[in-house]
Image (cartoon, helix red, strand yellow):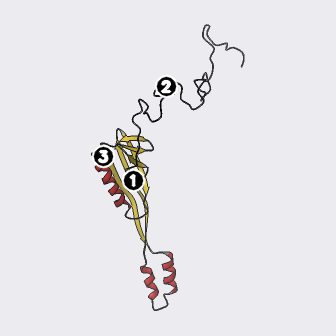
């Protein structure tokens, strides 16, 4: 492989496979790996602490006003794992994808079989019912050309009403 390419036209430089520098190699010899290069946009090594960096907006702070799953409303923006969205004009939706089943527990069936000989009173154990909720409540928000959806596990039958209360509050602060 150290021989020159016999098929290369005259005057054309020798082809070298791969990038000039290895992947992840610092572009600036003075900056370490993972550090921004000196003099890049919005970076100033003499920038005092607490001063907003130009081009990156004002610093956000404060306590969250609302949190639904992994969607959090902080100040005038909506924070999601996909990024920030503006709060003003956001469209909120929720879908109930849960279900509640009613079934006879195993212990009630065992007690009914054991006590059926006592004048049939054991059959009263078959009237015992347990409610089991499964599924999810899906919450979606759309704002600023972005869309995010989250699924909240349904742990009780009244979860959808609770989430709809939060959605109502989110819609009210989005309209301001």
Q: Which mark is residue 120?
A: none
Outermost residue, front side: 48
Within-10-Å neighbours for mark 3: few <14, some 14–19, many 20+: many
> In x, y percent, where is residue 54?
42, 29
Q: Foreground residue, 13 or 41?
A: 41
First in sequence: mark 3 or mark 2? 2
Whole-number angstrom distance, CA of label 1 to CA of label 2: 41 Å
Query: Which residue: 61% across, 7% down?
Result: 11
Q: Is residue 146 above or below residue 124?
A: above
Point 63% across, 19% down: residue: 16
Look at discs 3 and 1 and give the one toward the viewer: 3
The answer to which of marks 3 and 1 sits earlier in the sequence is 1
Looking at the rendering, in which quadrant would you find the N terminus?
top right
Closer to the eye: label 3 or 2? 2
First along the sequence among labels 1 and 2: 2
Q: What secondary structure is marked by label 2? A: loop
Within 10 Å of disc 1 (Cα), the crowding (few <14, some 14-19, many 20+) is many
Residue holding disc 1: 138
Location of mark 3 (residue) = 174
Q: Which residue is mark 2?
A: 40
Q: Is residue 11 above or below residue 95?
A: above
How dense is the environment of label 2, judged by Cα within 10 Å: few (below 14), some, or many (20 and up)?
Answer: few
Is the C-beta separation of discs 1 and 2 under 8 Å? no
Residue 175 in the image: state x and y as whole percent. 27, 46
Q: Position of residue 167 (x, y in %)?
A: 33, 53
- Foreground disc of the pair 1, 2: 2
- Element marked by disc 1: strand
């Amino acid at each position: 492989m150290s021989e020159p390419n016999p098929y290369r036209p005259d005057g054309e430089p020798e082809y070298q496979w791969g990038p000039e520098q290895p992947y992840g190699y610092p572009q600036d010899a003075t900056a370490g790996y993972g550090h921004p290069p000196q003099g890049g946009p919005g970076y100033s090594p003499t920038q005092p602490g607490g001063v907003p960096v130009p081009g990156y907006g004002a610093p956000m702070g404060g306590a969250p006003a609302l949190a639904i799953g992994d969607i959090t409303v902080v100040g005038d923006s909506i924070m999601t794992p996909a990024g920030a969205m503006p709060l003003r004009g956001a469209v909120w939706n929720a879908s109930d994808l849960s279900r509640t089943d009613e079934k006879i527990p195993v212990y009630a069936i065992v007690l009914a079989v054991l006590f059926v000989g006592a004048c049939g009173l054991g059959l009263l154990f078959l009237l015992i019912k347990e409610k089991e909720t499964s599924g999810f409540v899906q919450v979606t928000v759309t704002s600023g050309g972005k869309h995010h959806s989250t699924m909240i596990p349904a742990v009780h039958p009244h979860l959808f009403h609770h989430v709809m209360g939060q959605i109502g509050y989110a819609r009210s602060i989005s309209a301001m």
